[in-house]
């Protein structure tokens, strides 16, 4: 009886761990791969409807965060996105939120209430039905995040905030290492 109970517990722990670790294999398998060119887009800002393209952000690392105010997982990730935006500002990383909200007032109020002070855009169109940007970036789940290098190449595509954080930390470490090498050369 004890062996059976232990087996059942071990089985459920294994399955839950597998499911927790496997979000990318379920929802991110079709995302653009590292090294691929990030598709350019032109989209309107929340403030004044000004149009901005991804190409205009070349020269910066860019995090694209695909989200919606009605998405529970997106809401859960907002504090971490805020933290990452603040923490990696020193690396000149541009955070860009791309919302699939369809109601402009709801979208803008949500951004304001949650103090989402990084760039925010929306086509104000239905996800998977009317928007072209989700097709270009193969978005099958939200939140989805991409890290793009200054030349416009994909570094990472994921649905897991912890993987984005790890990639940004690795980027930060490489900047520190490069700075140390440069300071040694100038001494």
Image (tube, rainbow, N blue to C red):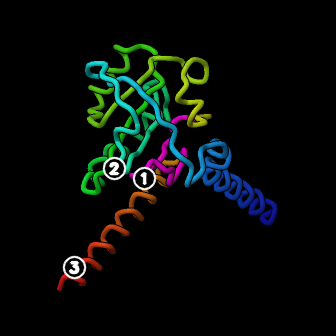
Q: Residue furthest left?
A: 187
Q: Which mark is residue 60?
A: 2
Q: CA distance from mark 1 to mark 3?
A: 24 Å
Quadrant occupied by the N terminus: bottom right
Depicted 104 relative to depicted 96: above or below? above
Q: Is residue 101 magenta?
A: no
Residue 184, by quadrant, is: bottom left
Query: In the rendered structure, which disc, 2 or 3, sits on the residue that comes first in sequence?
Result: 2
Q: Are discs 2 and 3 less than 8 Å apart at CB?
A: no
Residue 11, by quadrant, is: bottom right
Judge the density around disc 3: few (<14), some (14-19), many (≥20) Cα neighbours within 10 Å.
few
Q: Which residues are magenta?
A: 141-159
Residue at image position (45%, 47%) is 152
Q: CA distance from mark 1 to mark 2?
A: 7 Å
Query: In the rendered structure, which disc, 1 or 2, sits on the residue that comes first in sequence?
Result: 2
Q: Are discs 1 and 2 less than 8 Å apart at CB?
A: no
Residue at image position (62%, 47%) is 23
Q: Label 3, secondary structure: give it.
A: helix
Q: Is residue 158 magenta?
A: yes
Query: In the rendered structure, which disc, 1 or 3, sits on the residue that comes first in sequence?
Result: 1
Residue at image position (40%, 25%) is 43
Q: Label 1, secondary structure: give it.
A: loop
Q: Nearer the viewer, residue 15 or 187?
A: 187
Residue 44's spot in the image, x, y percent? 36, 23
Residue 69's spot in the image, x, y percent? 43, 25
Q: Which residue is mark 3?
A: 183
Quadrant occupied by the C terminus: bottom left
Q: Which residue is mark 1?
A: 149
């Amino acid at each position: 009886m004890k062996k059976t109970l232990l087996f059942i517990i071990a089985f459920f722990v294994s399955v839950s761990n597998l499911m927790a670790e496997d979000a990318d294999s379920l929802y991110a398998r079709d995302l653009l791969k590292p090294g691929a060119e990030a598709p350019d887009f032109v989209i309107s800002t929340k403030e004044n409807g000004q149009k901005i393209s991804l190409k205009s952000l070349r020269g910066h690392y860019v995090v694209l965060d695909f989200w919606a105010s009605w998405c529970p997982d997106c809401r859960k990730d907002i504090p971490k996105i805020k933290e990452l935006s603040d923490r990696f500002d020193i690396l000149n990383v541009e955070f860009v939120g791309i919302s699939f909200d369809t109601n402009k007032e709801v979208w803008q109020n949500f951004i304001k209430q949650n103090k989402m002070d990084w760039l925010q855009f929306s086509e104000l169109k239905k996800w998977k039905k009317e928007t072209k940007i989700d097709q270009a970036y193969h978005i099958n789940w939200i939140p989805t995040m991409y890290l793009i290098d200054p030349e416009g190449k994909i570094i990472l595509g994921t649905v897991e905030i912890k993987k984005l954080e790890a990639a940004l930390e690795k980027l930060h470490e490489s900047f520190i290492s490069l700075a140390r090498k440069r300071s040694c050369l100038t001494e």
